[in-house]
Image (cartoon, rainbow, N blue to C red):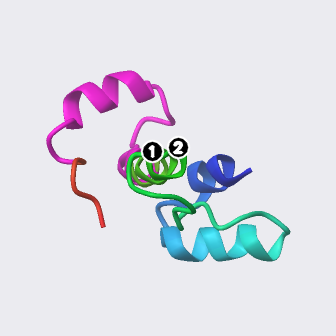
Amino acid sequence: MTMYDIMKNAKDVSLDDIMERQILLGGKNLLKPFHKVGSKSSERLEFIKKFYEYAKENKDNFNTSWSEWLKNHKDSVKDLD
């Protein structure tokens, strides 16, 4: 549900606000790692941040695939905060 929310709302809503809405709907805070660095939750956190940037930058109704976008943005999404 979080990824769908991101796809639909990233251009108008911050990632923190999207996550807050998901928490209020009964989901977990996927932006907060629950374990040490290098764990699955850390990997998930980085994935969600990158996916948010992908959705926010999208200008072609998601005709540009995630894989294609990621190849073209590898360096620019390394250190998202």
Q: Residues within 10 Å of mark 2 (few under 14, many from 20)?
A: few
Between 10 and 81, the residue placed more toward the observer is 81
Bounds of the magenta span?
52-76
The amino acid sitting under disc 1 is Glu
Mark pair 1, 2: CA separation? 5 Å
> Circles 1 and 2: CB distance less than 8 Å?
yes
Between 72 and 59, the residue placed more toward the observer is 72
Q: Report the residue at 45% width, 52% height from top.
A: 42
Q: Report the residue at 43% width, 24% height from top.
A: 65
Q: Is residue 3 left or right of residue 26?
A: left
- Under circle 1, the secondary element is helix
Q: Quadrant of the C terminus?
A: bottom left
The amino acid sitting under disc 2 is Lys
* Image position of 43 with respect to 28: above or below: above
Q: Which residue is mark 1?
A: 43
Name the mark on residue 63. none
Question: Residue 7: image x %, image y %?
Answer: 58, 48
Name the mark on residue 40. 2
Q: Report the residue at 71% width, 73% height from top.
A: 21
Question: Residue 20: image x %, image y %?
Answer: 66, 76
Q: Is residue 38 magenta?
A: no
